[in-house]
Image (cartoon, helix red, strand yellow):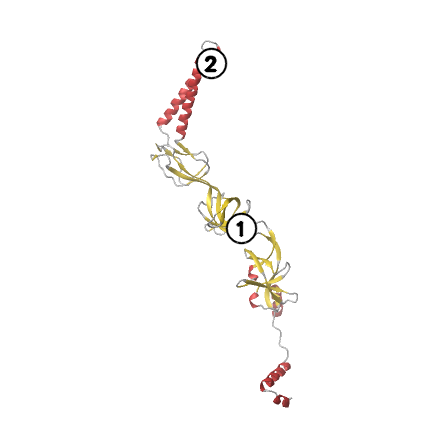
Amino acid sequence: MTSTLHKLPPLLALLLALSACSDAEPDRPQAPAATVTTAAVASKPWSDAIEALGTARANESVLVTAKVTETVVRVNFEDGDLVEAGDVLVDLSGRAEVAGLEEAAAAYREAQKQYQRLQQLTAQKLIPTSQLDAQRGTLEATRARLDATRARLSDRVITAPFAGVLGFRQVSPGTLVTPGTTIASLDDISVIKLDFAVPESFLAALAVGQTVSARSAAWPGREFTGTVRTIDSRVDPVTRAVTLRAEIPNPERELRPGMLLTLRVFQPERQALVIPEISVIQVAQDAHVFRVKADDTVEQVDVKLGQRRGGEVEVVEGLAAGDRIVVDGTVKLRNGARVVEAAAAEPAAEQKGA
């Protein structure tokens, strides 16, 4: 053998010698199994969500204003008061208007009594019918004057048109107001209208009645749920977006008009394959996971992902229901590596220590 090696080229002789040495060495020990956490791929109900930003609006909103030129007599509310429909907010009525109403009411009562007396006399044929007809005209005229006086007086008593929350008071007793003078703002915020826009590409996936989940920076961790009520009939030609309006119950009045809310519109539920998001290894645009085979070794599998939510991700392609994948411990793995479940490895370590 030695004489034969001397006849070979030096480089080839070196390679053969190293090969002979490696053949003579005993088999190296196999690498220990990596301890990992695994989970089974499961099919579960999944609802796609469209994300957007929305602006909160009051269910009803109005600026309460004066209708006539008059001096404020009484203000019956304070800033931020809750009022019911019909509550008197401001009284502008003066003595002259009250006296005019009493005068018109007295004239109407007198005309009514006179008409009733003439009716009796006409029935007895003591007076002509034309005299009764004239008195009927007088009665109707006094009734009209009474109604007009009441209407003028009602313009001087400003009431809440609906139940809601009042804003800051803009007048005080003695203030001279004119038609259009703002008394206060009034907002019904028992229900919040949430207006938001989404790209026109989602139009086919939108429908009245879909569930909306909204969050506000003012209430961290809180989630407000509502329903889509209206989809605008037009698409904005500049932004290519369609506006929707959702309604969110607000019984505690935590949401206020003008607030910015982040929201998600949920589409109807469907079945989807779902895995933990931390099990996915993302490299640029590619994603893969490690699938555990029957012999406790792993293989790298390329996957196509869909929507994500709350630490979970939808798998569109690459896995099947029942496949077991590595969730925690993917960093130390490679194709063909042996693994052992963390829950199974701990009892074995305890027995060895005992």
What quarter of the picture does the N terminus occupy?
Answer: bottom right
Helix, strand or loop for disc 2:
helix
Residue lying at 48% horizontally and 46% vertically, measured from the top left = 194
| Image spot of residue 295 (x, y percent) | 65, 67
Res 166 quadrant in image = top left
Residue lying at 51% horizontally and 52% vertically, measured from the top left = 51
* Residue type indicated by callout 1: Phe
Write down the residue under mark 2: 119
Write down the residue under mark 1: 202
| Image spot of residue 221 (x, y percent) | 50, 52
Where 72 falls versus 8 (above or below)?
above
- Looking at this rendering, what residue extends furthest in the right direction? 294
* Label 2 packing within 10 angstroms: few (<14), some (14-19), many (20+): some
Q: Marks 1 and 2, Cα distance to the nearest angstrom?
A: 75 Å
* Label 1 packing within 10 angstroms: few (<14), some (14-19), many (20+): few
Q: Is residue 117 visible?
A: no
Q: Is residue 305 visible?
A: yes
Front-lying residue, 40 or 305:
305
| Image spot of residue 104 (x, y percent) | 39, 22
| Image spot of residue 257 (x, y percent) | 45, 45
